[in-house]
């Protein structure tokens, strides 16, 4: 499946890009919110499984209306624990560490920051997880999902559509890289995607990407390490990265990365 082979449904705020795999459809919801959230719906036989949750009230209403004709069998809540007013009656699935991430860890800190920044338009309430899952296969709505626990939450392989979900990729966007060791771990994960030959890489802050984008990201991460090794402080590092990648978005991510490399 080519990442550009989809049908677009324009909504009032966001848009839905629908990939048709035959027995299974993937609905990629581009929220157009302040933090560029992306939410995914896997549909089979009139049943739907949602991956991640919108967290702004207008997006929550919009996506709820879009799902009216589908039976939502569950929501996989990995990195985006806020937005508990979204599908409050649906089963919610997460690993134990993802629950901790949203309730008391780094995810909770982000939710607090977003609440302070956006106020009443942001749903800061955290989803109550009804099904705590571990690594391996879980079947929801007739679709198999392979759960892989990460340091903060979990990734998801979807064999039926030869796709994988991870928190971030973004081939032309800076990423939060917590030093050279973290860059190496990210590279190892991405090289695993190349070996498995996924058609689509789904992330919660970018439209679906492909293996060409994975290769671009690996080269970027390798170069970040090289740039950091040649710099003496965070400002010099940011300046050089900006010079080499002038079109990249995510300046705030680059600021965080510089802080990790030059703590």
Image (cartoon, rainbow, N blue to C red):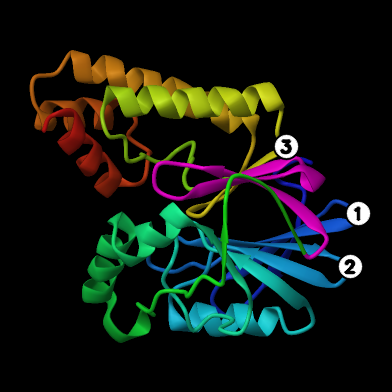
In the rendered image, which quarter is residue 23 located in? Answer: bottom right
Residue 93 x %, y %: 58, 64
The circle on residue 199 is 3
Identify the magenta region.
Answer: 141-164
* First in sequence: mark 1 vs mark 3: 1
Which label number is shown at residue 232?
A: none
Q: Would you place residue 102 above or below residue 85 in this image?
A: above
Give the side of residue 15 with respect to residue 163, left or right.
Answer: left
- Precedes in sequence: disc 3 or disc 2: 2
Closer mark to the observer between disc 3 and disc 2 = 2
Which of the two discs, 2 and 1, labels the residue nearer the N terminus? 1
Q: Would residue 6 be counted in the magenta stretch?
A: no
The residue at which mark 2 appears reads as 45
Mark 2 against mark 1, which lies toward the viewer?
Answer: 2
Percent position of residue 57, x then y? 45, 83
- Work out how far the residue at label 2 is from the one at label 1, CA to CA, in angstroms: 11 Å
Q: Is mark 2 on a helix, strand or loop?
A: loop
Q: Quadrant of residue 13?
A: bottom right
From the image, tell me which residue sits under label 1. 22
Counting other residues with Cα less than 10 Å from the Cα at mark 3, is it few (<14), some (14-19), or many (20 or more)?
Answer: some
Q: Can residue 35 be seen in this view?
A: no
Question: Label 1 vs label 3: CA separation?
Answer: 15 Å
């Amino acid at each position: 499946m080519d990442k550009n082979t989809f049908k677009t449904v324009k909504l009032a705020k966001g848009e839905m890009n629908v990939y048709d795999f035959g027995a299974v459809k993937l609905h990629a919801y581009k929220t157009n919110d302040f933090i560029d959230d992306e939410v995914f719906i896997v549909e089979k036989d009139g049943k739907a499984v949602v991956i991640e949750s919108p967290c702004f009230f207008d997006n929550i209403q919009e996506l709820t209306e879009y799902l009216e004709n589908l039976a939502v069998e569950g929501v996989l809540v990995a990195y985006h624990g806020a937005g508990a007013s979204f599908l409050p009656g649906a089963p919610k699935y997460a690993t134990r560490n993802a629950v901790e991430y949203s309730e008391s860890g780094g995810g909770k800190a982000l939710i607090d920051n977003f609440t302070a920044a956006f106020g009443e338009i942001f749903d800061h309430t955290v989803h109550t997880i009804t099904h705590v899952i571990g690594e391996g296969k879980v079947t929801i709505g007739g679709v198999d999902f392979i759960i892989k626990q990460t340091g903060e939450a979990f990734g998801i392989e979807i064999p039926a559509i030869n796709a994988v979900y991870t928190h971030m990729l973004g081939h032309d966007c800076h990423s939060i890289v917590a030093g050279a060791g973290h860059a190496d771990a990210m590279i190892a994960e991405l090289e695993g995607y190349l070996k498995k030959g996924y058609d689509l890489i789904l992330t919660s802050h970018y439209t679906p990407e492909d293996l060409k984008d994975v290769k671009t990201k690996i080269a970027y991460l390798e170069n970040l390490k090289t740039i950091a090794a040649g710099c003496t402080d965070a400002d010099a590092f940011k300046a050089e990265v900006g010079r080499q990648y002038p079109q990249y978005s995510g300046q705030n991510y680059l600021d965080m990365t510089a802080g990790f490399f030059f703590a």
